[in-house]
Amino acid sequence: MRVIVAEDSALLREGLVRLLEDEGHRVIASVGDADALLAAVAEEAPDVAVVDVRMPPTHTDEGLRAAVRIRRERPGVGVLVLSQYVEKRYATRLFSENTTGVGYLLKDRVVEVDEFLEAMARVGGGGAAFDPEVVRQLLAGSSRQDPQGRLTGREREVMDLMAQGHTNPAIAARLFVSQSAVEKHANAIFDKLDLGDTAGYSRRVLAVLRYIGA
């Protein structure tokens, strides 16, 4: 894949570039601020942009705002956001946008090379990839909200993996159940979240949004 890396830490940026190139990806630009990221995306049209949340000049949410802008203006570009900590307001903003081709990972996940590369591949392929810890904290923050209480324990497990961006076959493999069992649980989730008449991938996205109260 053709990748742009946007990270203000030169050490981490170069590490990401080396990792991606060693795995056969083509890094077409590596930048240290949000303005340079937007310019590079406009010029190069990458498959994926790997973006740090906090970038110059204020080191607050420049990267996140750039990521949201990219998703709105260039929906064909996947965006994988990296953050040092779980920042719920940033993750929720990403969830509330179009969640096809978007991901949010903690930087610690980068050292889990296979997981990081799998997440980037999902995002580049138009899927979603959200860090399990991010999902856990988002779901914990919505624990007092219905309809979470209407789901069974297994349905919550399926919903948790769905929120991370996994497909039904991937969920089946992780839970050691059949794909038909996952489909049955997913349909029950959609019914309980009043999404039974909604079709396609958008139903999964709406389910996640409704579940976390985004």
Image: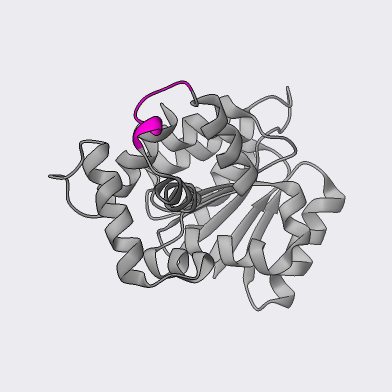
User: Of residues 56 and 182, which is closer to you in this image?
Assistant: 182
* Residue 212, magenta (yes or no): no
- Above or below, comparing residue 22 to residue 118 in the picture: below
Residue at 49% of width from left, 30% of height from top?
92
Residue 46 appears in the picture as rendered: no
Left or right side of 10 for 35: left
Q: Quadrant of the N terminus?
A: bottom right
Residue at 74% of width from left, 62% of height from top?
112
Magenta span: 144-150
User: Of residues 141 and 89, which is closer to you in this image?
Assistant: 141
Residue at 40% of width from left, 70% of height from top?
169
**Numbered marks: total:** 0
Rendering coords of residue 88 (x, y %)? 59, 28
Q: Quadrant of residue 181?
A: bottom left
- Above or below, comparing residue 7 to residue 77 in the picture: above
Q: In which quarter of the image is residue 185?
A: bottom left
Rendering coords of residue 107 (x, y %)? 74, 48
Rendering coords of residue 2 (x, y %)? 55, 67
Q: Quadrant of residue 63?
A: top right
User: Of residues 83 and 5, which is closer to you in this image?
Assistant: 83
Residue 48 appears in the picture as rendered: yes
Left or right side of 151 for 70: right
